[in-house]
Amino acid sequence: MSKAERTKEFIVEKTAPIFNKKGFAGTSLSDMTEATGLTKGSIYGNFANKDEVALASFDYNLRKLRTYVRAEEEKAKTIKEKLMVRTFLFEKERLVAYPEGGCPLINTGPEADDTHPALKERVANAIESWKERTISMIEEGIRNKEISPDANPEQAALTLISMIQGAIFVARTTSKPEYGRSVMEVARKYITSL
């Protein structure tokens, strides 16, 4: 890896938590220079603008999330256990321990919806990818007779995503993780019923 690539990676690693917590609009150049210890020229010598840093930071946070979830899925023995991985996020000591600041989809989606088309597209693509992965798992579960053939894979995937994202949103917004745990319990019952 070249020095420029290492510097770029360093900038993203240091700014990703800030973008995830404060959002695009709330993250200032001062936040970025303070977090990295670099000058404005160093940051913008590696990225064309704040938008590029924000997009790279979202991608970084999403990779962290996916790495964590997939590692947990690998431990699961059945499709239903794999589907339940995200429902156990609230059972950990911290509300959502990865990436720093919580779920990048919840943190980025609402802000980007009306203000940042490129970030909105990244979030939408991540949700579509999650949906397709979940559909594949459900279809595999149907094939191996773990899930009822009557299950509608796309509908079930969208229901699960909505329950999980909704649980995170309500718990974080109200600062009441028990709300999230309650919804996740319902999501687990839904998975069991498939």
Image (cartoon, rainbow, N blue to C red):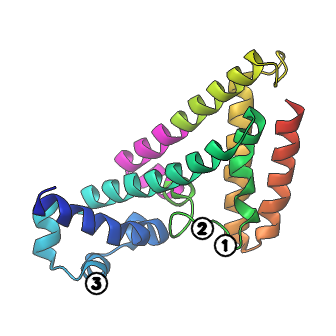
Which amino acid does the dot numbered 1 rest on?
Answer: Arg
Quarter of the figure with residue 49: bottom left
Cα distance in 3D space between marks 3 and 1: 26 Å
Quick check: marks 2 and 3 in contact, CB under 8 Å? Answer: no
| Segment colored magenta | 109-127
- Tell me: 27 left or right of 10: right
Badge 1 is on which residue? 94
Question: Residue 148: x, y in percent?
Answer: 85, 20
Q: Position of residue 42 (x, y in %)?
A: 12, 72
Q: Could you say whether the residue bearing mark 3 is in a helix, strand or loop?
A: helix
Image-quadrant location for residue 18: bottom left
Name the disc covering residue 34, or none.
3
- Compare marks 2 and 3 and give the one earlier in the sequence: 3
Three-letter amino acid code of the residue under disc 2? Ala
Quote the CA–CA distance across marks 1 and 2: 5 Å
Q: CA distance from mark 2 to mark 3?
A: 24 Å
Q: Residue at x 17, y 69 (%)?
A: 43
Judging by the rendered image, the residue that carries numbered circle 2 is: 97
Q: How crowded is the residue under tag 1: few (<14 C-alpha within 10 Å), some, or many (20+)?
A: few
Predominant secondary structure in magenta? Answer: helix
Q: Position of residue 153 (x, y in %)?
A: 71, 23
On the rendered structure, is 11 left or right of 61?
Answer: left
Q: Judge left or right: residue 117 versus residue 191.
A: left
Contact between marks 1 and 2 (CB within 8 A): the answer is yes
